[in-house]
Image (tube, coloured by chain):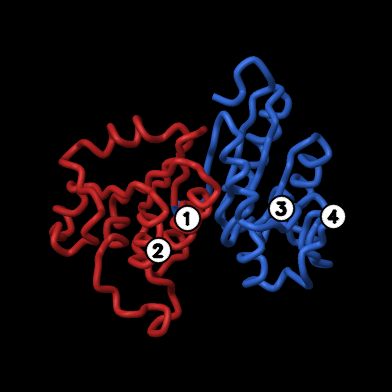
Chain colours: A blue, B red
Amino acid sequence: MVGEGKKKTMTMMLFTGPYGSQYADHMCRIADRALDKGYGVQIFLYGDGVHSQLKGQNPKAFFNVGEALTKLAEKGAVIKSCVRCSTARGYVEGEFNEKEERYPSSKTIDAVKIYSLYGYVEMLGNTDKAITLGSSN
Amino acid sequence: MSKILVLITHPPFGHENTFAGLYVASAALSKGLEVTVAMTGDGVYAGQKGQVDPLANINMPSTEDQIRDILDLGGRTIVDQDSMSERGITQEELIEEVEVQPLGKIQDVVLDEGEIIVTF
């Protein structure tokens, strides 16, 4: 495996949006614990999972997934989302920005970079563990 | 190089899951990764041939076309015979190149082929 003798890496894919289920919460809590245990954490938002990147989430009672993703990025998690899924759901506002390595959007939190699906493939090609959440809906 | 197993458990239409999973498989193959697609449960319907232009008819991509692309790219595709039997699907109804695994063997394939397992 790629992580032998060095920092281990975990890749998480979220396929469902926040609040309708707790998959996003579970992912964020597992990712946070993994970071605390010394893992490198890579997250890819796919399908309806891209809604977790929405800026300004304000749940009254639920776990705030947008804030959690921002904290995870601050702790070192790499977080990307699918451009095809994001475009379909109205997030993408232009062509790929080479300098920032992301597709532009004023509607998303800075912690998440909208990227091609190859971003997920690169994560899978460089990981010790892989988990998918929310694809059983 | 990691072996990636894409486990398909949803039917081809009605949900985005199967399209999304097969799309990951194609992308991974095009980047040189080793990929096996395993269809089980309602996922076995994705392997049926003769889909009549679903993109034009119901605005959903053809999983038959996606699987043929995966095979062309060198991917392995397997279908769980147990799930086929439960649903009355015969091997003749499937894309010819898709492998049908005997009863109970799908679990062995998942363990042998899946260093990295992603589920849809």
Report the Cα–Cα distance between label 3 and label 2: 42 Å
Identify whether A100 is placed above or below A133. Answer: below
Mark 4 or mark 3: whose residue is earlier in sequence: 3
Identify whether A55 is placed above or below B14. Answer: above
- Chain to which the residue tagged by mark 3 belongs: A
Q: Position of residue A7 (x, y in %)?
A: 69, 22
| Most distant residue in the top direction | A5
> On the image, numbered disc 1 is attached to which residue?
B26
What amino acid is found at the position of numbered circle 2 in the picture? Gln
Report the Cα–Cα distance between label 2 and label 1: 8 Å
- Chain to which the residue tagged by mark 4 belongs: A
Work out whether disc 1 and disc 4 sit on a shared chain: no
- Chain to which the residue tagged by mark 1 belongs: B
> On the image, numbered disc 3 is attached to which residue?
A61
> On the image, numbered disc 4 is attached to which residue?
A100
> On the image, numbered disc 2 is attached to which residue?
B66
Which residue is located at x 35 percent, y 61 percent?
B68
Query: Closer to the camera: disc 4 or disc 3?
Result: 4
Work out whether disc 3 and disc 2 sit on a shared chain: no
Report the Cα–Cα distance between label 1 and label 4: 26 Å
Which residue is located at x 34 percent, y 36 percent?
B110
Q: Position of residue B91 (x, y in %)?
A: 15, 57
Q: Residues within 10 Å of mark 1 (few under 14, many from 20)?
A: many
What amino acid is found at the position of numbered circle 3 in the picture? Ala
Q: Give the structural element (helix, strand or loop) at label 4.
A: loop
